[in-house]
Amino acid sequence: MPNAKVLESKKAVVEALTGKIQESTSVVFVDYKGITVAQDTELRKQFREAGVEYTVVKNTLTNFATKNAGYDFSKVLNGTTAMASTTGDPIAPARIVCEFAKKNKLKTLAIKGGVVEGSVLSADQLNGFGELPSKNALVASVLGTFLAPISSLAFVLDQIRIQKDPNAAAAEAEA
């Protein structure tokens, strides 16, 4: 039986993890075995830049925390486990892990499972999120589709103006 101090410190860790899981928009559990220190440093840097918190966690304590938060990850919390969580872009943790593993040709760096906006997702589902572009890229794409018809209309109107005014075509050719 562990002494009271050790037990209290473990309870504090479980409470902190439970709070982090509950307040995050996305939590992804990652199997990080097989990566070098340099690769781990680069991965952590990418997580920081995206506003994702990445920590190595103890499986037993994390299992208690996920159960306190209302989830059951007992089947995936084994072996080497890290937790990537964010309160921002919910796709960011999965996308960063997938892109990093693909870029560095790492077959051992893998998503185990996770929670996105309250829904428990499997590793396959999260890997599918990893293929999606970032939220900003999606917004830019939508805005680009809004601008395309306007740009086409402006081009057509300009061509009509040039057809009706031959001097305008000559002036544009000189410029």
Image (cartoon, rainbow, N blue to C red):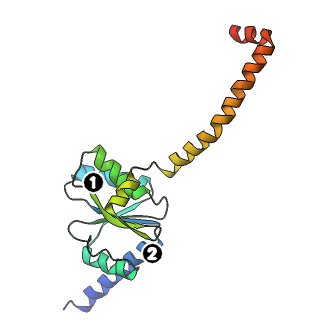
Q: Determine the residue positioned at 43% across, 56% down.
A: 92
**Residue 27: x %, y % from top left:** 39, 66
**Residue 71: x %, y % from top left:** 37, 77
Say few, some or many: other residues with alpha carbon within 10 Å of mark 2 (under 14 / 14 to 19 / 20 or more).
many
Q: Which residue is mark 1?
A: 40
Q: Amino acid at mark 2?
A: Gln
Judging depth in this view, the residue of 80 and 163 nearest the camera is 163
User: In the displayed structure, does residue 138 sit left or right of residue 107?
Assistant: right
Q: Is residue 130 shown above or below 77?
A: above
User: In the displayed structure, does residue 167 sit left or right of residue 71?
Assistant: right
Assign the N terminus to one quadrant of the image: bottom left
Say few, some or many: other residues with alpha carbon within 10 Å of mark 1 (under 14 / 14 to 19 / 20 or more).
few
What kind of element bears circle 2?
A: helix
Q: N-terminal of the two: label 2 or label 1?
A: 2
Q: Is residue 61 shown above or below 121?
A: below
Q: Is residue 32 shown above or below 63?
A: above
**Residue 147: x %, y % from top left:** 64, 38
Front tag of 2 and 1: 2
What kind of element bears circle 1?
A: helix
Q: How many marks?
A: 2
**Residue 35: x %, y % from top left:** 22, 53
Q: Determine the residue positioned at 32% across, 81% down.
A: 64
Residue 47 visible to the viewer = no
Q: Amino acid at mark 1?
A: Asp
The numbered dot on residue 63 is none
Query: In which quarter of the view is residue 21 placed?
Result: bottom left
Q: Which residue is mark 2?
A: 22
